[in-house]
Image (cartoon, helix red, strand yellow):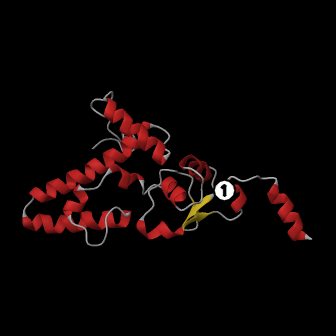
């Protein structure tokens, strides 16, 4: 089993890391989702690989085992927001790494228009300006469950000027005008 205090590696590196097409794809994903390094991408790929492996195993299992375990797998993926209500094992096999990366808090903040770029959304999260379900989350890689997807908002005290990256000199002038 292993020591519970000893952290394990949560990702697998690519078998051939220097293929041109793979490097180009990784670079595209890093830029599109604003990832810090390739390790974050490899974590998402490893998670997806594990889920797809479970689905392939269930397809080969007996009918009794398949019915029982398929429901568990589909329910967990629904909670994570990766598949819809009427999903099947084939839908799990068609998942891509983009689907997994789009569930990250960093991506959701950017897609909701709270930030100008994926890197700006990462900065807002790390600095504690984003809340999920009333809790401040400072982890850009936090996987937002489907039930909390609508509760992703900017924290109280973070104005539109700061969030949009506008001129910060305008904010005190507006506050002075409101005070008078």
In the rendered structure, the answer to whether residue 15 lies left or right of residue 41 reads left
Q: Is residue 81 above or below residue 57?
A: below
Residue 14 in view (yes/no): yes
Residue under the point 60% across and 48% down:
123
Residue under the point 54% across and 56% down:
110
In the rendered structure, the answer to whether residue 12 lies left or right of residue 162 reads left
Residue designated by label 1:
164
Image location of residue 149, percent across then percent down = 47, 66
Which residue is the extreme one toward the top? 18
Q: Quadrant of the C terminus?
A: bottom right
Residue under the point 36% across and 66% down:
79
Image location of residue 124, percent across then percent down = 62, 52
Q: Quadrant of the N terminus?
A: top left
Mark 1: few, some, or many residues within 10 Å (few <14, many ≥20)?
A: some
Please state which of residues 164 and 49 is positioned toward the viewer in this rendering.
Answer: 164
In the rendered structure, the answer to whether residue 122 lies left or right of residue 158 reads left
Image location of residue 135, percent across then percent down = 57, 63
Please state which of residues 33 and 134 is positioned toward the viewer in this rendering.
Answer: 33
> Quick one: SS at disc 1?
helix
């Amino acid at each position: 089993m292993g020591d519970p205090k000893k952290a394990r590696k949560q990702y697998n590196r690519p078998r051939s890391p220097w293929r041109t097409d793979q490097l180009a794809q990784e670079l595209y994903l890093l830029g599109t989702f604003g990832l810090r390094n390739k390790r974050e991408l490899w974590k998402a790929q490893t998670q997806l690989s594990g889920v797809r492996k479970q689905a392939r195993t269930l397809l080969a299992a007996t009918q009794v085992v398949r019915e029982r375990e398929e429901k568990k797998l589909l329910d967990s993926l629904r909670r994570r927001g990766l598949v819809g209500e009427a999903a099947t094992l084939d839908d799990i096999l068609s998942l891509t790494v983009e689907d997994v990366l789009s569930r990250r808090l960093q991506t959701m903040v950017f897609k909701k228009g709270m930030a100008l770029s994926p890197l700006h959304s990462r900065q807002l999260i790390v600095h504690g300006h984003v809340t999920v379900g009333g809790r401040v989350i400072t982890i850009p890689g936090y996987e937002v469950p489907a039930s909390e997807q609508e509760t992703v908002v900017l924290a109280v005290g973070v104005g539109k000027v700061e969030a949009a990256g506008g001129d910060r000199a305008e904010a005190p002038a507006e506050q002075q005008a409101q005070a008078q």
